[in-house]
Amino acid sequence: MLEAKELECERGGRSLFSSLSFTLIGGEALRVAGANGRGKTSLLRILCGLLPPSQGEVLWKGTPIRALKEDFSRELVYLGHAPAVKDDLTAAENLAIACRLAGNPQPDDAVAEALAQLGLAGVNQQVRKMSQGQRRRAALARLALSASVPLWLLDEPFSALDTGGVDTLRDLIFKHLERGGAVAFTTHQDPGMGAAKVVDLDA
Amino acid sequence: MLDAVRCIVGRDLLLALRRRTDIATALLFFVVVASLFPLGIGAEPNLLRAIAPGVIWVAALLSTMLSLARLFAADHADGTLEQLVLGAAPLGVVVAAKTLAHWLLSGLPLVLIAPVIALQYDLPQPLYGVLALSLLLGTPVLSMIGAIGAALTLGIRGGGVLLALLVLPLYVPVLIMGAGSVEMAAAGLDPGGQLLILGALLVFSAAFAPWAIAAALRISLE
């Protein structure tokens, strides 16, 4: 489904990686490993189209993502380093808006169910009053509603989560893989889940 | 696509409602700046009447500037801007919706409050309509031009000052036409020409600004 061809990334005049090629097909998980500053986040941003690579290109089902633009955006969920939740809104409001903007509007009860799945049932306060871990869970709740979206790109999804949260997330990812979805995620610690493919930027 | 516009405008209005002080500051700034001139210059009615259109328009410009810095910066800081860029709607539509929300929150209140300021300057009542109309046509242009600057200076240190230097010169045509229309009407002439040019500026920027903002935003996000 997703194919990276000879990718090269340059940030601030320094080459982070070059000639990076890999493919990711449905049902596969790709782990991007590497020390801090090796370009894990940059790679993920290249894959979702936020950052144009200095060389090479990314293909989605054979078409360059540059040409697909929002048609590609609709096929992916990208959860970045920042949780992407608004402080002044509640978790439910944040989730409903995020899904609507992604072209995947969800009824209120589905939103409530997704939040409950992430352990945020009945947490009806503005995100500003939540802890870091709860924010992360509020952001990850989007995955529970994104079963129909084939490609998940997750930047450090396991950070700031307690063991229960890690288990829930791992469960969500496994289910997505079983459905035939593809997942690429970055992490610098071993999350305790086997990934079919590993891109190690240290190598 | 229309749903995305509704969603973004609704979201920004809801956020503003939760954070009313942000909107109130820009509006209060407008009122205070416009009220300082009579205090500094003295209460000579003829002089005040003469400077009123210019002062009110300059105050509107500065007040719009003040609220521009927040247009994309808050969304950039918490990561929601990336989600907007990766949304299902084309980026041009997304930024058009954000700019519309910005105008509803910072431009429209100016249009509504301007007659009250005009009262302070003893502007003759028939001119209120022209003043409000010129602001109604001009402030959306201010929001759109400003949004281009806000997108370009996103994430730059000291971006606020740079934004002012970048955007204020571009506001000059709007200022001249806006204040000019009220002055024309005050002189007993037909302000139609200036208002039509303001209208043309509005149409022109509505057609091209969204794409310029989108392009600037993509560059800033890299």
Image (cartoon, grey):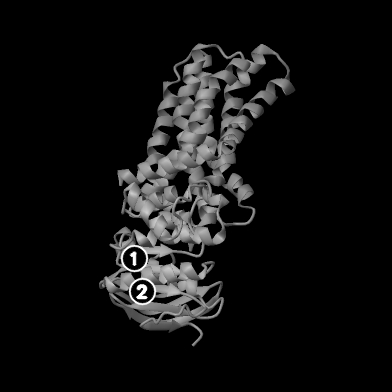
Q: How far across and how far down the image is residue B173, in percent?
A: 51, 35
Residue ID for mark 2: A57
| Callout 1 amino acid | Arg
Disc marking residue B52: none
Label 1, residues with CA under 10 Å away: few <14, some 14-19, many ≥20: some
Q: How far across and how far down the image is residue A5, in percent?
A: 35, 79
| Callout 2 amino acid | Glu
Q: Is residue B126 visible?
A: yes
Residue ID for mark 1: A66
Which of B176 and B85 lies nearest the eye of the viewer?
A: B85
**Is residue B123 left or right of B208 when viewed as pictured?**
right
Q: Which of the image's four quarters has the N terminus of chain A?
A: bottom left
Q: How far across and how far down the image is residue B158, in percent?
A: 64, 53
- Helix, strand or loop status at disc 2: strand
Question: Residue at left 41%, top 56%?
Answer: A116
**Is residue B122 left or right of B131 when viewed as pictured?**
right
Chain letter for mark 1, please.
A
Q: Residue furthest bottom?
A: A203
**Is residue B77 left or right of A52 when viewed as pictured?**
right
Tell me: residue B166, above or below residue A9.
Answer: above
Q: Is residue B209 visible?
A: no
